[in-house]
Image (spheres, rainbow, N blue to C red):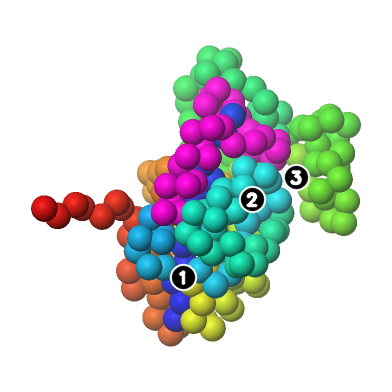
């Protein structure tokens, strides 16, 4: 069975500014580029040979994948992109300061939406220019598939569906797979793989550009998982 490497993209410009990003296509910050380079070097140092790569449609995840593959000397690897690996759609909160939203709605509502499982943020208006129907990346999709906002539960449904329809079959073939995605799409996938229930998913923290490796048995049951760390220097 192959190994699965999950990586949240490096810090984006809006991560640095503490702004809800969601499906907004924000670029990596300079420090996010450095984080992705470090992730690629870790993968190389641990002798992991990536055979296939998956990312979302969003440039911060795509660029993180590219940088990792370059830093690990594996730029020949194909990278398949899917909107189903996109970040959670934060609806009307997208582009808004997290601190301002927390002050406006209060701590309880804020954390119930941000770290909860089933509660989505307020939806976008159908004619809001932030709606993905106005983004040419999604022209080929049925309009009914484009969310106005999403809970983590909604995000998990599409991410897990994609995992089983596209990623799991590569693992079964013995391939080492890199997935470069987002905080919530990675959280949703981790919850599925590690069998974390909805009441405990709020405790799952996904750091930017820290590679997490998952190993499975022949039935795709999890046997081991760990984060890659810098090798200790010996004197």
Q: In the rendered view, does 97 fall on the left or right side of 199?
A: right
Q: Which mark is residue 62?
A: 2
Which numbered disc, 1 or 2, marks the residue that appears first in the sequence?
Answer: 1
- Residue 60 occupies which quadrant of the picture? top right
Q: Residue at x 59, y 36 (%)?
A: 28
Label 3 crowd bin: few (<14), some (14–19), many (20+), radius 10 Å: many
Q: In the rendered view, does 220 fall on the left or right side of 12?
A: left
Q: Residue at x 64, y 22 (%)?
A: 96
Q: Is residue 60 above or below residue 214?
A: above
The quarter of the image holding the N terminus is bottom left
Range covered by the magenta-colored residues: 14-41
Q: How far apart are marks 2 and 3 (CA)?
A: 21 Å
- Front residue of 78/75: it is 75
Q: Contact, CB < 8 Å: mark 2 with mark 3?
A: no
Q: In this view, does 163 lie above or below 83?
A: below
Q: Name the residue under label 3.
A: 147
Which numbered disc, 3 or 1, marks the residue that appears first in the sequence?
Answer: 1
Q: Which mark is residue 169?
A: none
- Front residue of 73/201: it is 73
Which numbered disc, 2 or 3, marks the residue that appears first in the sequence?
Answer: 2
On the question of residue 51 being in view, the answer is yes
**What secondary structure is found at the residue carrying circle 2?**
helix
Q: Distance between the residues labelled 3 and 1?
A: 36 Å
- Residue 202 occupies which quadrant of the picture? top left
Q: Where is residue 66 in the image (x, y as percent from the top left)?
A: 60, 53
Q: Mark 1 points at which residue?
A: 49
């Amino acid at each position: 069975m192959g190994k699965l490497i999950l990586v949240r993209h490096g810090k984006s410009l809006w991560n640095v500014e503490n702004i809800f990003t969601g499906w907004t296509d924000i670029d990596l910050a300079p420090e996010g580029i450095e984080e992705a380079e470090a992730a690629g070097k870790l993968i190389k140092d641990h002798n992991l040979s990536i055979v296939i790569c998956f990312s979302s449609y969003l440039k911060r995840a795509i660029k993180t994948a590219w940088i990792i593959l370059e830093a690990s000397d594996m730029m020949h690897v194909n990278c398949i992109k899917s909107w189903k690996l996109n970040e959670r759609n934060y609806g009307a909160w997208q582009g808004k300061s997290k601190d301002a939203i927390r002050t406006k709605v209060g701590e309880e509502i804020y954390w119930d939406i941000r770290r909860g499982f089933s509660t989505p943020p307020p939806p976008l208006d159908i004619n809001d220019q932030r709606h993905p129907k106005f983004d040419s990346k999604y022209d080929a999709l049925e309009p009914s598939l484009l969310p106005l906002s999403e809970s983590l539960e909604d995000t998990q449904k599409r991410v897990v569906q994609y995992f089983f329809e596209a990623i799991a079959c590569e693992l079964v073939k013995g391939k080492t797979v890199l997935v470069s995605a987002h905080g919530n799409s990675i959280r949703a996938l981790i919850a599925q793989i590690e069998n974390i229930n909805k009441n405990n998913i709020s405790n799952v923290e996904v750091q930017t550009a820290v590679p997490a490796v998952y190993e499975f048995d022949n039935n795709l049951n999890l046997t081991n998982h760990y984060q890659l760390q810098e090798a200790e220097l010996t004197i």
